[in-house]
Image (tube, rainbow, N blue to C red):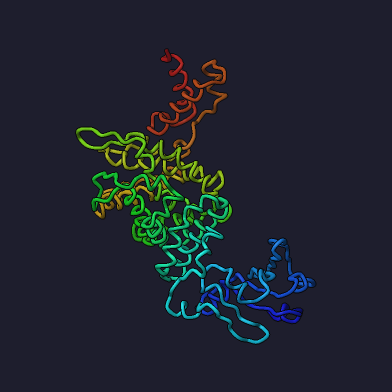
């Protein structure tokens, strides 16, 4: 800070979220400075890298050790007018580095004291609709309560979110999903109809009763599933004592920039049943939703792209939604064979572990603790199979012969029959009928003799 002060010829202020967090005694690495002059004067000679962030608005960024320093020129001639352009009162304070004094024209310090999130002007959301999402993100992160006026204005202008760049939407949603209790924010947005602007597929579930635990409708079930997942994740050591560290490592893996598998899993829990409205059929025995998992998977990929996520995150989101019923269906069988477990993990790999966690959250949201503890032994068994058997048994993971060898044995050209033979061989290996290359060759030859 002393470096910038020494070079400043105009007034230099500490502003924004860093000042807010400083007053709240919260750690922050994002430093915001407002300089009444040309910010480049402060940055010239800086022994750190810096670059223009938005040169048309006079905003530049420097990286100083672990800190990200944003220096901006004012948007108005007077400090108070510049602060008035910001979003919330708690972000509209300034600290004069030359006078060593706090400037708080809009009562931000009092709102901090009362843990109150108050929008600064009636037109703040209209000027930047992303602030609607930021309301719920900041309330979650700070533990603050938005004022009634703030919520009313957020609801009124939420429709403009469709005009916001998807990348900005993604960044805010990602920050919300990073919180261990993100379901609170989505529940609050859902109660005001704001969630329906971002995820109309979830809103379509309102009023669709499925006989779920607590009598909640489909929309309520989806919100409850996210809540259930966030209730489960802190207790992985209790439910999966042997595998919890590996599961946490998996959840923390980055799918794409700033997006972890845990975040994608959370989003999947919120939308896993979105295929139900379009597959719903009324029958004498009640409603059925056959094929809703496949339909939901197709919609999930489009949702991921619409919200600004990349191909990898969108594909993972679609995979989780499409296969969320697999373990539920296996659990209904009297005996889950080694062959069935192998097929599950050959198709999904370690992503099948995420499907298992999603299934548990779904069960808890659907049937309460009774449903959760019914499914838990099945998920434990699947996880044990993956870590203790599947990863160490190559016969479960890939065929003992490759495609070229199969073509040579059967006299085939490349085509679907080769793939069918390889899948049949892999199934035979999983069942223990084929245990080495010699038996694999004999098995494939027999396939050729019995083929129609």
Which residue appears at 43% of the width and 18% of the height? Answer: 446
Which residue appears at 52% of the width and 45% of the height? Answer: 306
Q: Quadrant of the C terminus?
A: top left
Residue 98 in view in this figure: yes
Which residue appears at 79% of the width and 71% of the height? Answer: 44
- Residue 281: x %, y % from top left: 29, 33
Q: Is residue 259 left or right of residue 238?
A: right
Question: Height in image: 319 above or below 129?
Answer: above
Judge by depth and name the residue closer to the eye, 100 or 82.
Answer: 82
Which residue appears at 78% of the width and 73% of the height? Answer: 41
Q: Quadrant of the N terminus?
A: bottom right
Judge by depth and name the residue closer to the eye, 341 or 130.
Answer: 130
Q: Residue furthest left?
A: 284
Q: Is residue 256 left or right of residue 242?
A: right
Q: Please tell me in which quadrant of the rendered image residue 94 appears.
A: bottom right
Q: Is residue 220 left or right of residue 442?
A: left
Residue 236 in view in this figure: no
């Amino acid at each position: 800070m002393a470096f910038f002060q020494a070079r400043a010829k105009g007034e230099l202020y500490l502003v924004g979220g860093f000042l807010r967090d400083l007053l709240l005694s919260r750690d922050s690495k994002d430093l915001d400075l407002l300089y009444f002059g040309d910010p480049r004067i402060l940055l010239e000679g800086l022994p750190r890298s810096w670059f223009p962030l938005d040169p048309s608005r006079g905003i530049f960024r420097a990286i100083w050790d672990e800190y990200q320093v944003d220096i901006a020129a004012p948007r108005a001639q007077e400090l108070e007018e510049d602060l008035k352009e910001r979003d919330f009162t708690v972000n509209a304070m300034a600290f004069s580095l030359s006078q060593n004094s706090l400037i708080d024209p809009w009562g931000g310090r009092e709102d901090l004291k009362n843990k109150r999130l108050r929008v600064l002007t009636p037109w703040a959301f209209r000027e930047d609709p992303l602030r609607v999402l930021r309301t719920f993100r900041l309330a979650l992160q700070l533990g603050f309560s938005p004022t009634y006026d703030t919520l009313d204005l957020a609801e009124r202008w939420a429709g403009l979110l469709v005009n916001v760049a998807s990348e900005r939407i993604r960044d805010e949603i990602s920050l919300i999903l990073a919180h261990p209790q993100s379901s609170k924010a989505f529940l609050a947005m859902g109660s005001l109809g704001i969630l329906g602007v971002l995820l109309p597929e979830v809103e379509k579930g309102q009023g669709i009763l499925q006989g779920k635990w607590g009598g909640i409708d489909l929309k309520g079930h989806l919100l409850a599933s996210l809540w259930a997942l966030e209730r489960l994740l802190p207790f992985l050591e209790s439910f999966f004592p042997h595998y919890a560290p590996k599961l946490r490592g998996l959840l923390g893996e980055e799918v794409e920039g700033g997006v972890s598998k845990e975040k994608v899993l959370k989003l999947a829990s919120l939308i896993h049943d979105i295929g139900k409205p379009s597959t719903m059929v009324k029958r004498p025995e009640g409603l059925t939703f056959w094929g809703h998992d496949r339909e939901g998977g197709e919609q999930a990929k489009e949702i991921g792209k619409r919200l600004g996520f990349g191909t990898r995150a969108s594909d993972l989101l679609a995979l989780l939604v499409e296969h969320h019923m697999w373990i539920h269906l296996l659990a209904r069988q009297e005996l889950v064979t080694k062959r069935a477990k192998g097929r599950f993990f050959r198709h999904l790999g370690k992503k099948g572990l995420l499907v298992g966690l999603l299934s548990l959250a779904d069960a808890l949201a659907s049937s309460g603790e009774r449903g959760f503890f019914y499914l838990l032994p099945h998920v434990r068994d699947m996880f044990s199979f993956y870590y203790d058997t599947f990863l160490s048994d190559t016969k479960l993971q890939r065929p003992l012969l490759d495609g070229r060898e199969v073509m040579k044995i059967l006299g085939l050209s490349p085509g679907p029959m080769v793939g069918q033979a390889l899948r049949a061989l892999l199934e035979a290996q999983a069942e223990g009928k084929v245990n080495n290359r010699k038996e694999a060759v004999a098995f494939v030859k027999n396939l050729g003799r019995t083929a129609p």
